[in-house]
Image (cartoon, grey):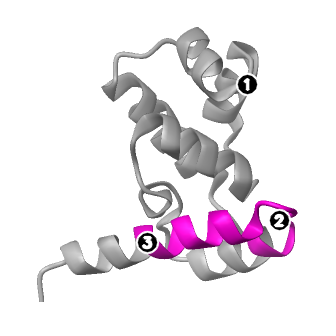
Amino acid sequence: MINTGLIAGRLKRARLSLKMSPEEAGERTGFSARTIRRFEREGLTDLAKLDILCECYGIDLMDIVNTHDESHYLTNAIKSLGKDACRIIVSLCKAMEKHHSDKPD
């Protein structure tokens, strides 16, 4: 099971670290401030929307979805992608590569 609470908390911390209001995040992403607050309260399992938020916050997808069950989450999320699948998967792969290269041996 996906830990949407963990994802919600990470999204909120990422926004707050930029001293960005929900309204400002909404303007930059195209989501409403109400939707931003909902994502931060309930979490989010839509990989395309997560990618938009990560781009806005200047963070990698792996920083948001990195949990013990990330492969299950990613498999299900990729299945639901539409026309942006290639762009999002490339972004995810780059984030994973960076994430793994940043780890000490």
The answer to which quarter of the image holds residue 100 is: bottom left
Residue bearing mark 3: 94
Q: Which mark's residue is nearer the viewer, 3 or 1?
A: 3
Q: Residues within 10 Å of mark 1 (few under 14, many from 20)?
A: some
Highlighted magenta segment, given as a residue range:
78-95
| Separation (CA) of disc 3 from disc 1 | 25 Å
Assign a secondary structure to mark 2.
Answer: loop
* Helix, strand or loop for the magenta stretch, by majority: helix
Crowd tier of the residue under label 3, counting other residues whose Cα lies within 10 Å: few below 14, some 14–19, many 20 or above: some
Mark earlier in primary sequence (3, 1) = 1
Asked if residue 50 is among those painted magenta in the image, a careful observer would answer no
Q: Inspect the image, locate mark 2, and give the three-letter code of the amino acid beneath it.
A: Leu
Q: In this view, does 104 lie above or below 88?
A: below
**First-in-chain label (3 vs 2):** 2
Which is more toward the observer, 34 or 89? Answer: 89
The answer to whether the residue labelled 3 contacts the one labelled 1, judged by CB atoms less than 8 Å apart, is: no
**Residue at position x 53%, y 50% in the image:** 6
Structural distance between the alpha carbons of marks 3 and 2: 18 Å
Residue 85 located within the stretch drawn in magenta:
yes
Packing grade of label 2 (10 A; few <14, some 14-19, many >=20) is some
Q: Name the residue under label 2.
A: 81
Q: Which quarter shows the N terminus? A: bottom right
Report x, y in % for residue 60. Answer: 43, 56
Name the side, left or right, on which 34 lies relative to 82. Answer: left
